[in-house]
Amino acid sequence: MLLYQPDSGYCYNSDSIFLYDFISSFNPKGRVLDVGAGCGIVGLLVARDNPRVELEAVEKQEIFVRYATTNARVNKIACTIHEGDFLELEESNKYEYIISNPPFYHDGASKSDNKMLFNARYNSNLPIGDFFKKITRLLKPQAHFIFCYDASQFGLICAALDRVKLRVVDVRFVHPKIDKKASLVMIHVRNGSKSLMKILPPLISFDGNEFSSEAQNIYKKASTQSIKCKI
């Protein structure tokens, strides 16, 4: 997949690649909404590999709307892109799947002066309480919400999801190395589920200075080629 990205500022990283693989493991189909789509990488990869997906995306930064629109066109993937704040998205349409790599740097993290980076990284732009309440209003019964977040905030995430009656059913932690603490958590939530949480085996990103064999396989499956440029 060919992906155009800004030549400076925020670019996708392994979080998006790993999240795409995690989402695809649940065989998504039907109406899928990618929240905070950026250049479109997560939703476009999911739609490419799951032909029964009807992809939509929401992105509030106009520059990323341009990149996501271009990336959908050049990769010949149908995608309806909503420009604007997710919290203000029209609620008459409901979704089978909502997916997201949201901004998750916490309030205590050093803030970037770059507006693009600030909007893409810091959860003050999409507070989890408001985020999850909006999710509940857009999901169909028994539908899926799949996203990633800072692993150190997992307890806060579970508590916030419980307050809006969303059930975490599958969790996978991502560790930079086997002896390092988790840096990312990927979470599968279902609307109306009564299942107990399943903790999946961890994903280890690196083996020494090289990607682990699993990470290499995920990158091979994604098969992305990035071009940094201005659009």
Image (spheres, rainbow, N blue to C red):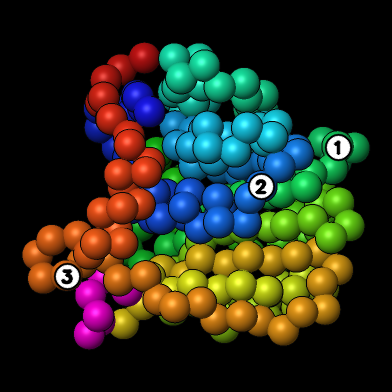
Please report the residue visible at 52 percent of the width from the left and 32 percent of the height from the top.
Answer: 48
Label 2 sits on residue: 28
Q: What percent of the width, then of the height, locates residue 200?
A: 51, 77
203, 42: nearer the viewer: 203
Disc 2 is placed on an element classified as: loop
- 128 to 98, vertically: above or below: below
Tell me whether the residue at label 1 lies in contact with that at label 3, contact meaning CB atoms closer than 8 angstroms: no
Q: Report which residue position mark 3 lands on.
A: 207
What distance separates the C-alpha of mark 1 from that of mark 3? 44 Å
Measuring from the top left, give residue 64's x and y in whole percent: 46, 29
Residues tagged 2 and 3 counted as in contact (Cβ below 8 A): no
Q: CA separation, marks 2 and 1?
A: 18 Å
Few, some or many residues within 10 Å of mark 1 (<14, 14–19, 20+): few
Residue 97 is situated, as x and y percent measured from the top left of the image, at 71, 49
Amino acid type, mark 3: Asp
Q: What residue is shown at x 58% (from left), y 34% (from top)?
A: 47
Picture disc at residue 93: 1
* Residue nearest the observer in this picture, 172 or 57: 172
Is residue 117 visible in this depiction of the protein? no
Q: What residue type is labelled 2?
A: Pro
At mark 3, the secondary structure is strand
x and y percentages locating residue 91 in the rendered image: 85, 41
Labels 2 and 1: the sequence-earlier one: 2
Q: Which of marks 2 and 3 is nearer the N terminus?
A: 2
